[in-house]
Amino acid sequence: METFFGPRDFSTVTPSNRPFYLLEHPEALWLKAFCSYIFSFQHVDSLIWFHDGIWISPAPSPDLVQAGNLHAATKIGLGTSPLLLRQRSCSDSYEQALHFFRLGRYPSDIHGIGIPA
């Protein structure tokens, strides 16, 4: 993997976290190529990079996501097929969080996981 994507020689790399750094590198390269592609075709007001996903606002069309995915996969040498992506809208969660923020309180239950207030 390092031969293909480049060495991971950070001072923080240890034998126990080396696999993490090796796998994060192609993910970061893919996300950079994907986002650059999206930005070249659509104005983006907000981009948030989560652990294993991104929030783009306004949301790009499914066709643009598919084209960006194929571009990124090809650009970093993962082949000529797009990666398998899962898309979902976070609008409902955003609206719920904004509602509780404006009320000045924390919701007693977020998506059924029972986070206490």
Image (cartoon, rainbow, N blue to C red):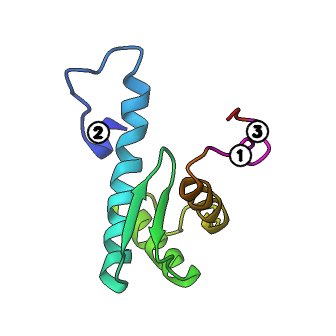
For marks 1 and 2, the one nearer the N-term is: 2
Relative to residue 81, is residue 8 drawn left or right? left
Secondary structure category for the residue under label 2: helix
CA gap between label 1 and label 2 equals 44 Å
What stretch of residues is rendered in magenta?
106-114
| Residue neighbourhood size for the residue with mark 3, other residues' Cα within 10 Å, grouped as few (<14), some (14–19), many (≥20) | few
* Disc number placed over residue 113 in the picture, else none: 3
CA gap between label 3 and label 2 equals 42 Å
Secondary structure category for the residue under label 3: loop
Task: Give the residue furthest to the front.
Answer: 103
* Disc number placed over residue 3 in the picture, else none: 2
Mark 3 or mark 2, whichever is nearer to me: 3
Residue closer to the observer: 16 or 57: 57
For marks 3 and 2, the one nearer the N-term is: 2
Residue closer to the observer: 27 or 5: 27
Whether residues under marks 1 and 2 lie with C-beta atoms below 8 angstroms apart, the answer is: no
Say which amino acid is labelled 2: Thr
* Residue 77 visible to an observer of this rendering: no
Whether residues under marks 3 and 2 lie with C-beta atoms below 8 angstroms apart, the answer is: no
Say which amino acid is labelled 3: Ile
Whether residues under marks 3 and 1 lie with C-beta atoms below 8 angstroms apart, the answer is: yes
Asked if 20 appears above or below 95 in the picture, the reply is: above
Q: Which residue is mark 1?
A: 110
Label total for image: 3
Residue 50 x %, y %: 47, 49
Say which amino acid is labelled 1: Ile
Secondary structure category for the residue under label 1: loop
| Residue neighbourhood size for the residue with mark 1, other residues' Cα within 10 Å, grouped as few (<14), some (14–19), many (≥20) | some
Task: Give the residue furthest to the right.
Answer: 112
CA gap between label 3 and label 1 equals 6 Å
Residue drawn at the location 53% of the way across and 76% of the way down: 66
